[in-house]
Image (spheres, rainbow, N blue to C red):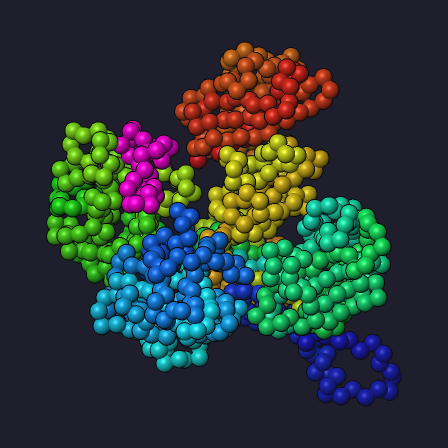
Amino acid sequence: MPYEAKTDWKYDDTVTEKDLNRIEQGLKDAHVAEHEALTLSPGVQLVEVENDTPFNFGEVKGRTLIDLTAGLGNIKDSNGDGIADGWVKSVNVTGTPTVESKFGMIWQVIPSVQTDTAIQRYMGFRLKRALPKDKKHVLFVDYFAEGDITAQVYFAYAQSGKTKLLGTVANSTRKTLYSPIDVTEDVASIYFYNASPVGTINKAYVSTAFVVEVPEDIYTKILNGDPEWSGEKLAAKYPYVDGMTNVRNPYTIVRGGNQLPPFTEWEARSESTQEFISPYEVQHTMQRAGRYLGTAVKVVPGQKYSLSVSEITDYARIRICVNDGPSYDNGTYIADLHSKIKNQSITIPNNVSEIALVLTNMPNIPSYPLVCTCADITMNAGGVTAPFAPQQRSMWAAECDLAANPVDGSNPDVLFQGVDGLPYVSKSWGKVTLDGSLPWGIPEVQNSGFKILFARDAAPNNASPGDWDDEGKIFAIKYDGKPMLGDDSGIGLWQKSDLVRLFTSSVYVSVSNTDSGWGDAYTPSADEIKAYFMGWKMYDNINPSNPHTPGAGKAWVKLTCRNADGTWTTKTPDARTTVPTEPAGSDTNGRVYTPYRLQYLKAQATAEPVRNYELGARLCKGANMVEVGSGIVLREKANPIYGGSGFYYVNTLSIINNPFKHKIKSIRMIYANQNEAKSKWIIDGVDAYGNERAKCLPENFDPTAVYHVTYTMLDPTLVAPISGTIAANLRGTVSDLVQHTGDMERRLSVVETQKAEKDVSAPEWIDGTPLNGWRPHEDQAYRSLSYRKMGNRLEIMWSLKPGTWEQTVIRLSPEYCVKRVVERPVIGWTSSGSVVVTATYTPKGELSFYATLGTTKADIGTVRGYLYLPLD
């Protein structure tokens, strides 16, 4: 407990044993460092500490899960016909429930109507790889019920009828149902039934369905209803995954004291304007009712919170609601703050993990616009109102992939902190993407119906040299999500496709002619094998339904491009008659090719440094809300592009080179030249690659700044507990701060030394000659047209008078080429001021300029700019 000093001693006061113990405890706290263990669980939790203290990271253990439905349970409707890919239904009935599906997927409907018998309505899918009877599996299904009676949900292994009750789902309720799969023969298909009684009207919606293999002891606990392995606890231990998924990019975010961000980070609805007097004081102007300023806050279910505001104008209020709608003002309201009630205590409803706060209008406003001022808003855990203080926010995160045995969790990768204070991973598993970058070949040994292919030295340091038992050592997933079988019987004995083997350090796989398009008599070239692993199928250009044979015309199509009738498309850009040299990526229907993936146990674990991380999580005195999650991407370089509609955009799907590497679930922070700048950007979900994009008005955009974004990925990843320690007394806190300060100074000195060495050895600029009528400008504040290579980065600088727009200005040699087209806004000068010009640099090493739509090119007298581009 905190030391409390007695400073009013009198001459004749009696000193008791309690006084001496208190004094001695204070001396001990000041001289002997004490620490206590702290394990942070996935999700949001409340952590209370007596003193401000750093969080000393301990470790995160890896985990792997494989969805054995091969992605069929990720319900998608690529053809737009109302039926999920790979599923069958007894009747095609459409409908949309009142809750969102998981991961941006659709809902499938199983109706039950008055004239039905229970067995008539079903939906289901046939597994790409049957579940063997000698293994233990569990089926999970995400359901939502809608109607006048509780839905009774069954499943079966064939269309013959319902056989086992999964559970019941009450009206307007969402629930994860599960069942052990206990069979006497291999399971090839799974079907679901809405078996509500005849005479009732009811719909059961399915959003996700997946199957995982579990150890026999866990299977027995689930079968027997063990409290730790049933209900929500079981669902939390086995979340939905897509294909083969690991713990990826774990993080913990700490919000100390005030749980509310400054008003500068709240999001505004249209027809409203904001003037920020200070970060926590805003003047919000609404042109009509409901034009809110809002923010979402993660909370602990069942926890009590206190809210207060020091100033709020009449006719305005802060509404607190359960964040269960598509926008902040659509939630279920649970409290209000306004000029007459400035303090409020609320208890979060059970099963609610996020609330929204909305600055908006009171009812019956006499006139608009309404100008309201709000200042010093506070939300603290606990029922007692605390004095206003800004939010204290910190984070610990590391970009890494942590695996383990998918069934029993053995041999996990471990993320830990080294003696230098930096994160490292002890990697027990090797992960290989089997794509076109590997040196593929074809051995002489072959069989009919499939081809055996190998990639030399693709799996170094594997635990399986020569003859070995592959059980628990190798796991592979096809491009379509189907798990492959490990088979070390020798490739000469292989009799089917979709097998995988490691021999020495090489990877062998068998590929069916149906997948590749090659006939038995055809021997593909090395480039054609690479094309297959980049997502392209070969076919006979004369008859696309036939496998390719020697002498026939060649054509290729993206592996994702099957038509509704099962045939392959012949339309560009999804098909071509020259061997592809680039990954298939996404097709015109939005379906994305995912390469084969391999995970194998290493012969010896290796320690590898984490390249991208963010350190410095700290706990503040009192209550802290701590969020533990995964899938964070730290400070990815953004490419803001002016969209021609009054904004600069990042992560807009329809703008070339604007989306990020991953679909975004949530944008956490935007940086301009490493400084926080999220308050100047507007977050919405329009035309976004994932859930969110960001846009910025020109007056808030700095064209000379380098922008980065930290975000969480939409793709599901596994979350693992984060262990560590915190100081338990004052001396422990001081010792931790001294240690952390020394680590930071040591790392800073290393960075400064490396930078100095880099500056000394910087290469000379190379002068280029502009093409297509472009010519040097007389002002030499910028180089006329020069470039140089700095490590794996390319720098280009110019000050030019325009020639022919949209034509090559300079063409550089291959060593200066980038991997993809890059577009950047630069400055063009007219007699009346500056305008935005787009510089484009292509993988062919060609630089060109485009004038923004609506700009008169003839008025532009000078184009100046600078590019700093990665070459990897």
In which quadrant of the rendered image does the C terminus lie? top left
What is the magenta range?
555-583
Residue at x-position 44% and y-position 73%: 199
Q: Position of residue 613 (x, y in %)?
A: 52, 50
Looking at this view, is 490 or 355 the one in front?
355
Residue at x-position 51% and y-position 44%: 689
Residue 178, above or below 291: below
Indicate left or right for 3 with 538 as reference: right
Q: Main secondary structure of the magenta part?
A: loop
Q: Position of residue 469 (x, y in %)?
A: 21, 61
Indicate left or right for 392 with 314 as reference: left
Whether residue 263 is visible, yes or no, is: no
Total count of labels:
0
Quadrant of res 455: top left
Residue at x-position 32% and y-position 59%: 125
Residue 868, above or below 97: above
Q: Position of residue 572 (x, y in %)?
A: 36, 32
Residue 182, above or below 821: below
Whether residue 17 is visible, yes or no, is: yes
Q: Is residue 573 magenta?
A: yes
In which quadrant of the rendered image does the N terminus lie? bottom right
Looking at this view, is 7 or 779 the one in front?
779
Quadrant of res 756: top right
Q: Is residue 545 magenta?
A: no
Q: Position of residue 817 (x, y in %)?
A: 44, 27
